[in-house]
Image: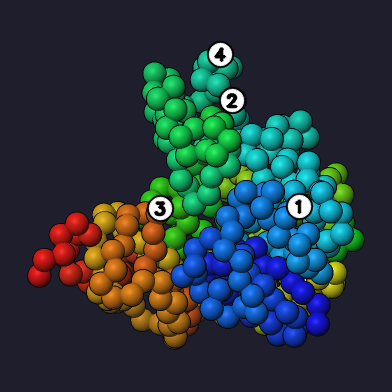
Amino acid sequence: MKKALLVGSSFSAMPLLKELKNRSLNVSVCGSYRDDPCHKYSNNSYYIDYSIKGDLLDLVKEENFDYLIPSCNDTAYNSCSWVQSKLKRFFGFDDDKITQKLHNKSKFRDYLRNKDLPSPAYTKSAEEYIEKKHPFPCIAKPVDSFSGKGIEFVKHSNQLNKAMKKAISFSAKKDCVIEEFLEGSLHSHSAFIKNNEICFDYFVDEFCTVYPYQVDCSNHPSILLENIKNKIRKSITFIIKDLNLEDGLLHTQIIVNNNNFWIIETMRRAPGDLYGSLILSSSSDNYWDNYIKAFLNEKVCSNNLSNLYKPIARHTISTKEELSTLSFSLKLDMESLNVVQLKNSGNILKKAPIDKMSILFIEFKDIKTLKEKTSMLSDLITINSYGLREYDKAI
């Protein structure tokens, strides 16, 4: 029985663990949080901090795994890519320099600008941003954060240095970029690559309704028109060919305004919060299965030859203020509801973007309702709370 190591143990990695186990592999999981769900169902668990790349390398060498699979966060992917750069024997990874070019926001901005690809105006210092007369408002963004953590909105030039300092405090690399704030709608594009071409892809509409820079509502299929989809595909295909990317997933966030678009960030790991389950619920394509195929040296394939999709919305329940959770209620006419519960009743729910209560998958009766309701979901949900703070447990 061949041995696979899944790097990451949280709930977001559970679908990946399931697909690996379906192949009758001996699946080990690593992650430092002992209560994470993947540890309960793996063949073996290793409680290491995989952000310490040397520790991950030592584990891989000692156990001689056949396959290395990163889960749904940047740290897992970056550490796996670094291990592959040392051992040169795993599948599905680009050269580590390419990984850093794609995953580091500063390096990716440099790449997009050098290749004249559509992206926001940006600089690496407040002085340069002002000197080049880039527009305000703008945002200061850590080069290596996720879920909108550490992003600061800046209205005036005299706020830039303070915003940069705060953004840097959220960065492991202690670095940030300043980029133009763009008006438009947010979308994601998941492209599965085969032989330097987009084999098949998915567009998803995304909304940040509780915390300004964290997606909490999304839907598939997308309402984007085919002409703008094709323009986006053209730019993504250029990146794929220019960097000679390995087969597998390239996931990109994009802002669209009328017939214009800007590439915001990209990644080669699976997006979190069960994004792949949104695609699976809407189509007959197993997103999770196709993601791991690249790391198992298998060919990706789409099962949905008809391009017929169910109108599905995904909503992550979060809150602007810390509270103790009991339950939630939802006022909505829908075809079906699937709830993934992340908090036990009575647990403290920290405010966004730190914490989440549940992830909902909602099927609507038609595309029109999907379009109308997805961005309103947080307004249609009531979180029922005990009214207790973590520090005040007296009843």
Q: Residues within 10 Å of mark 2 (few under 14, many from 20)?
A: some
Q: Closer to the N terminus: mark 3 or mark 1? A: 1
Q: Label 1 sits on what residue type? A: Val
How far apart are labels 4 and 3 at the CA level? Answer: 33 Å
Q: Label 2 sits on what residue type? A: Lys
How far apart are labels 2 and 1 at the CA level? Answer: 29 Å
Residue placed under numbered mark 4 in the picture: 131
For marks 3 and 1, give the one nearer the viewer. 1
Q: Secondary structure at mark 3?
A: loop
Q: Closer to the N terminus: mark 2 or mark 4? A: 2
Q: Closer to the N terminus: mark 1 or mark 4? A: 1
Q: Closer to the N terminus: mark 2 or mark 3? A: 2
How far apart are labels 3 and 1 at the CA level? Answer: 30 Å
| Contact? badges 1 and 4 (CB < 8 Å) | no
Residue at 40% across / 25% down in the picture? 162
Q: What number is the disc on residue 124?
A: 2
Residue 343, located in which quarter of the rendered image? bottom left
Residue 353 position within the rendered picture, expressed as x and y whole percent measured from the top left: 40, 53
Residue placed under numbered mark 3 in the picture: 353
